[in-house]
Image (cartoon, rainbow, N blue to C red):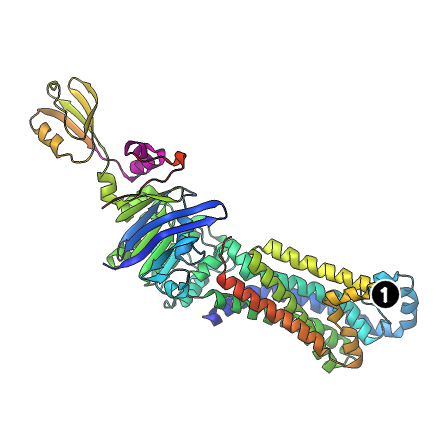
């Protein structure tokens, strides 16, 4: 029964997964294709970047030379593409079973059968994790494959580890959004809250980078733990960050299961 | 006969807003039970509690002894549900929707095809491209495709054309013949009159009447128009339950409440040129309850006073 619900959830997620994968592959491929140009003209780019305010560079994670693979990946993927893609996908997918389906009445139809609430939501959660994994692989894979094709010395092992961390970050967003959705039963509120908190954390992270006395603020945001630059440059996998994202994801999903099982389903 | 559904003091508040209050209803196995009331009376709230989607504020709802909230999965193995506007997924075709729901309910794949054909439903069309009526047909097919012993339907024929409404009533009759129990909420009075064995009338969240359809109609007044061969003598119609509304010599219009036999015996002694007796339908009865006329005439307080009225029960 859970498998049936899971298959349907995956099917319903196909279009989101497909089009977002196309976007990340296209974007990742294009920026990866530019990487040799950045390497060849590193000094020119560094001089050029100096004309921008430090806050702007910090906002996009440009804390070093773009010719450096870690900075390059952290800037274009870790600080820009993936947070946006993960947030959109996580919000769309995580608010669907606990809020959108309740609002549109599909939850009434599905839960009017012997399918339990726990199985209904668990199937959706597994499909969220699956789609986010596909998107993370597409995001990193696009950069890696196109980068290698154009001669970039990207390390597949480090990129694979980055995929896992990015995936866990996306799962954390989905877990928390799922919980907020189960509490509010409103896609608009849950999606708005999740997006708002992510944007706030992003801004907090920027402020923490440019204001030394406010550096402690970064501890309260998710982006401090998305350590892509170090991972790609040094190969040191941020297991602690990954563990934090995993705990938040599993905790959010588990709590949303508990809440969803016990609450009135009122659209 | 076993009790399929039992509501005991079932109450639901949405904060300070009234859902239903203190419902006591028993639906016996094998009967078709109508739950009648206008929009906002509490019909859908009751059905959502029967499905275990919302929790009662007080009281209980059980289906074959199983608590509908606590034992929801077990309850759902015994019932099929149809909502008034099912939120099917627009991207699936009717066939995919029905196959998915059939699989969840353990119904054989494709078991719905004969029903779809009977209701003239094209299963290859995506749900989002179906008209309101055709979407409701998907719901009717979905509800009747299984063999669950209980059907719970919330305004099931909404959006169906008259031909399909007739087919729907035929399906209900077949379900009853097969021994299935049907709980049908509606504000379609004709549907209730044709389909149901018993009816509960709910007003502003409270139950005001439970009766068989026959008793509901039979309990109420009949209008009798007489054309006499010669004017009746004074006091001819001074009978229990008979009220003369108008009399113009040979044309007499009387209302009879309750037993009609005294009037018929009196008429047997008169020479009649014509007689017309009309009985009220469920609609007349329903409107009487909602207009408060019955409440007033039977010593009950009206809804406007906000005080509680006793439930009438007749079989």
Residue A118 lies, in percent from the top left, at 49, 67
Q: Residues within 10 Å of mark 1 (few under 14, many from 20)?
A: few
On the image, which quarter does residue A80 sit in?
A: bottom right
Residue A190 lies, in percent from the top left, at 61, 57
| Element under disc 1 | helix
Q: Is A209 a magenta residue?
A: no
Magenta segment, prevailing SS (helix, strand or loop):
helix
Residue A23 lies, in percent from the top left, at 69, 65
**Magenta-tinted stretch:** B278-298
Determine the residue positioned at 29% across, 54% down. B27
From this viewpoint, is residue B46 visible? yes
On the image, which quarter does residue B289 sit in?
A: top left
Along the viewing direction, whichever of B7 and B125 lies nearer the viewer: B7
Note whether A202 is above or below B220 in the view shown: below
Along the viewing direction, whichever of A261 and B301 lies nearer the viewer: B301
Q: Relative to residue B119, is residue B225 drawn left or right?
A: left
Determine the residue positioned at 75% across, 67% down. A219
Q: Chain of mark 1?
A: A
On the image, which quarter does residue B206 sit in?
A: top left
Q: Which residue is mark 1?
A: A212
Q: Relative to residue A102, is residue B140 drawn left or right?
A: left
Q: Is B281 a magenta residue?
A: yes
Q: Quadrant of the N terminus of chain B?
A: bottom left
Note whether A262 is above or below B201 in the view shown: below
Note whether A3 is above or below A186 in the view shown: below
């Amino acid at each position: 029964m859970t498998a049936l619900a899971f298959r349907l959830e995956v099917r319903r997620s196909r279009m989101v997964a497909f089009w977002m994968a196309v976007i990340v592959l296209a974007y990742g491929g294009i920026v990866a294709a530019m990487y040799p140009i950045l390497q060849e003209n590193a000094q020119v780019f560094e001089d050029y970047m100096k004309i921008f305010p430090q806050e702007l560079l910090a906002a996009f994670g440009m804390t070093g030379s773009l010719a450096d693979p870690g900075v390059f990946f952290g800037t274009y993927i870790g600080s820009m593409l993936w947070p946006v893609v993960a947030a959109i996908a996580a919000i769309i997918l995580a608010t669907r079973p606990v809020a959108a389906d309740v609002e549109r009445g599909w939850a009434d139809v599905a839960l009017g059968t012997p399918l339990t609430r726990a199985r209904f939501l668990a199937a959706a959660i597994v499909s969220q994790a699956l789609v986010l994994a596909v998107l993370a692989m597409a995001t990193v894979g696009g950069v890696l494959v196109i980068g290698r094709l154009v001669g970039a010395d990207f390390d597949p092992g480090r990129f694979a580890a980055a995929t896992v961390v990015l995936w866990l970050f996306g799962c954390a967003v989905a877990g928390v959004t799922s919980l907020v959705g189960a509490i509010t039963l409103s896609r608009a509120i849950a999606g708005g809250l999740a997006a708002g908190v992510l944007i706030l954390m992003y801004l907090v992270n920027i402020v923490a980078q440019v204001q030394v006395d406010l550096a402690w603020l970064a501890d309260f945001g998710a982006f401090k733990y998305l350590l892509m630059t170090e991972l790609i440059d040094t190969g040191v996998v941020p297991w602690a960050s990954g563990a934090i994202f995993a705990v938040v994801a599993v905790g959010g999903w588990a709590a949303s299961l508990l809440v969803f099982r016990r609450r009135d389903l009122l659209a | 006969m076993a009790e399929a559904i039992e509501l005991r003091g079932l109450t639901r508040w949405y904060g300070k807003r009234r859902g239903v209050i203190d419902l006591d209803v028993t639906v016996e196995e094998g009967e078709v039970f109508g739950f009648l009331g206008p929009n906002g009376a509490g019909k859908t709230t009751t059905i959502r509690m029967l499905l275990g989607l919302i929790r009662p504020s007080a009281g209980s709802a059980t289906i074959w002894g199983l608590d509908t909230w606590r034992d929801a999965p077990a309850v759902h193995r015994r019932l099929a549900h149809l909502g008034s506007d099912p939120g099917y997924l627009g991207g699936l075709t009717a066939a995919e929707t029905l196959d998915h729901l059939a699989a969840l309910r353990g119904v054989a794949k494709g078991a719905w095809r004969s029903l779809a054909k009977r209701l003239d439903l094209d299963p290859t069309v995506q749900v989002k491209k179906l008209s309101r009526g055709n979407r409701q047909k998907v719901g009717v097919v979905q509800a009747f495709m299984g063999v669950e012993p209980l059907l719970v339907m919330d305004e099931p024929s909404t959006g169906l054309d008259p031909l399909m409404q007739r087919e729907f009533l035929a399906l209900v009759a077949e379900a009853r013949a097969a021994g299935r129990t049907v709980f049908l909420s509606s504000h379609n009075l004709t549907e209730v009159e044709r389909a149901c064995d018993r009816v509960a009338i709910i007003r502003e969240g409270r139950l005001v009447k439970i009766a068989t359809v026959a008793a509901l109609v039979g309990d109420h007044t009949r209008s009798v128009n007489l054309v006499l061969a010669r004017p009746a003598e004074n006091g001819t119609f001074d009978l229990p339950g008979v009220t003369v509304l108008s009399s113009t010599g040979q044309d007499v219009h009387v209302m009879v409440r309750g037993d009609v036999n005294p009037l018929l015996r009196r008429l047997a002694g008169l020479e009649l040129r014509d007689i017309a007796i009309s009985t009220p339908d469920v609609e007349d009865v329903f409107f009487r309850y909602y207009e408060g006329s019955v409440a007033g005439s039977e010593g009950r307080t009206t809804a406007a006073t906000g005080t509680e009225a006793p439930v009438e029960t007749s079989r």
